[in-house]
Image (tube, helix red, strand yellow):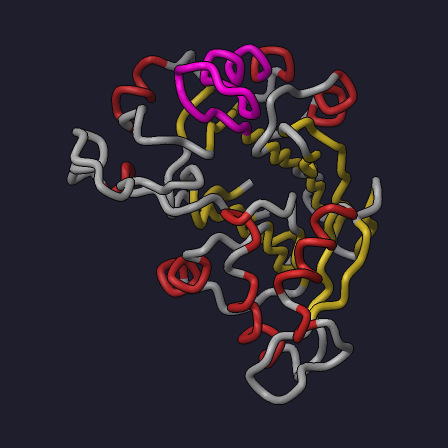
Amino acid sequence: MEVIFLGTGTSQGVPMIACGCAVCASPDPRNQRTRTSLHVVMGGLHLQVDAAPEFRLQCLRERIGWVDQFILTHGHADHVAGMDDLRRFCDLLGGVALPVYSTEEGLGRVRAMYPYAMAERPAMKGYAAFQLRLMPVRLDLPQGTVESVLLPHGGVETLGLVFTERASGKKFAYYTDCKTVPPAAVALARGADVVVLDGLRPLPHPTHLTIDEAVAVAREIAAPRTFLTHLTHLTEHTALAASLPPGIAPAHDGLRLQL
């Protein structure tokens, strides 16, 4: 299984507009954080999770050449606004609708934003078409499984996702944009080789895990490796990495993991 972090930043991105702080001005490319999205290759199947506003640029930077299926964790703008650029993958798939999985809330947002893509086939070459599907608790695929659990995120619930590759048995958990990780989600993530958690900032936030809260969840799950994502400009990569316990690290745009 390969995991590619296309973006690891908060809804405002880093550098942030009209900010000259040390992190926003940092020359370290790991502090250049586009909005959060992820690409998972499981047994040769390409699964795209979320499409940030920079999705096209992320795909070009990381040379993403194929998407078989798309999963939207929730309908907030920083996760859904790049979906129009999935049109290229509809072309590559032979002019058919791309399967899109999400919650009822997420699917509703896709319908509202992309009414022209609600079709079995693109209206013409170069257009997007989405086949909307409610994300099941367990999505069984020939290449493996994707299990889902709901995570609280303010007024909506986010899909927490656990990928298990059939051939290798490798397990990967992805819990972005959440205020807590309920017991059912902790149990689902146990045994994962790698876990990714929302770790917004050191300061409290009403809808996101803080870094300390994410560390506490990581200890509860007890995976060999945990990465924090959805990071703001309040954390500098090297300093944050040095402050975290062993086995926990900040993710960064372009990070690739081979499980």
Whether residue 232 appears in magenta in the rendering, the answer is no
Residue depicted at x 31% and y 24%: 235
Q: Where is 106 relative to 178, above or below? A: below
Image-quadrant location for residue 202: top left
134 relative to 91 in the view: left or right:
right
Q: Where is 87 relative to 62, above or below? A: below
Residue depicted at x 41% and y 34%: 251
Give the residues drawn in magenta, as a range. 197-217
Quadrant of the frame with the C terminus: top right
Q: Where is 149 relative to 97, above or below? A: above
Q: Position of residue 206 (x, y in %)?
A: 55, 20
Q: Is residue 166 visible?
A: no
Residue depicted at x 74% and y 44%: 146
Residue depicted at x 47% and y 44%: 36
Q: Position of residue 114 (x, y in %)?
A: 63, 67
31 relative to 197 in the view: left or right:
left
Whether residue 214 appears in magenta in the rendering, the answer is yes
Image-quadrant location for residue 12: top left
| Numbered circles on residues, count | 0
Image-quadrant location for residue 152: top right
Q: Position of residue 214 (x, y in %)?
A: 53, 18
Front residue of this view, candidates 15 and 58: 15
Q: Position of residue 138 (x, y in %)?
A: 83, 43
97 relative to 14 in the view: left or right:
right
* Residue found at the far bottom of this picture: 124
Q: Is residue 197 visible?
A: yes
